[in-house]
Image (tube, grey):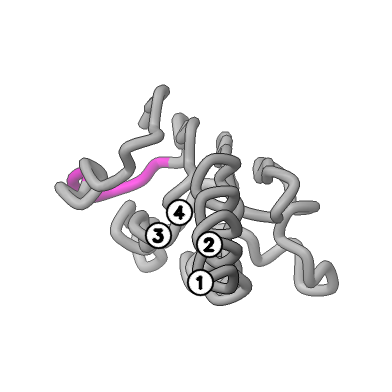
Amino acid sequence: MANYVFSFLIMAFYMMFGLSSSSSINQEHQSLLHSGWWNDHPNISNHCYWDGISCNEARSVTEIVRGPLRIPSSKELLWIQDLNITAFPNLLILYLSGMGLRGTIPTKITRLTNLTSLLV
């Protein structure tokens, strides 16, 4: 019984303070890499140190503020769908203004229940 109570308290602590498991941290990292929007950080393994990324104490992304990038050629368009938005459960702020993104805002963005500010 004591183990059950202890496990419950640990889980409640993680939920209350927005802490994430290493699996979800890895999902966030992979989503950022896959987007291709951070190719200028190949030698920095911790995504929390990338330009435009802010994280909480558990290294979970809470802010993505990515301003203008180089202007893509017509062969190299940037798509908003390139970022797996559902990989960021603790995201509070998403600013992607000036990136020249194509596509529509994914409806999956409604799953981000902590999102308080959006600018695309």
SS at mark 4 in the image = loop
- Gap in Å between the C-alphas at discs 3 and 1? 43 Å
The residue tagged 2 is 5
Give residue 35's position: percent from left, percent from top: 47, 65
The residue tagged 1 is 1
Q: Are marks 3 and 2 in contact (CB under 8 Å)?
A: no
SS at mark 3 in the image = loop
The residue tagged 3 is 83
Is 101 contained in the magenta span? yes
Q: Are marks 1 and 2 in contact (CB under 8 Å)?
A: yes
Q: Amino acid at mark 2?
A: Val
Which comes sooner in the sequence, label 2 or label 4? 2
Q: Are marks 2 and 4 in contact (CB under 8 Å)?
A: no
Residue 90 to residue 39: above or below: above
Q: Are marks 4 and 3 in contact (CB under 8 Å)?
A: no
Which comes sooner in the sequence, label 4 or label 3? 3
Magenta span of residues: 100-105
Report the residue that reaches farthest toward the front: 1
Which callout, 1 or 2, points to the residue nearer the camera? 1
Q: Are marks 3 and 1 in contact (CB under 8 Å)?
A: no
- Gap in Å between the C-alphas at discs 1 and 2? 6 Å
The residue tagged 4 is 88
Give the residue at x 15% y 47%: 107
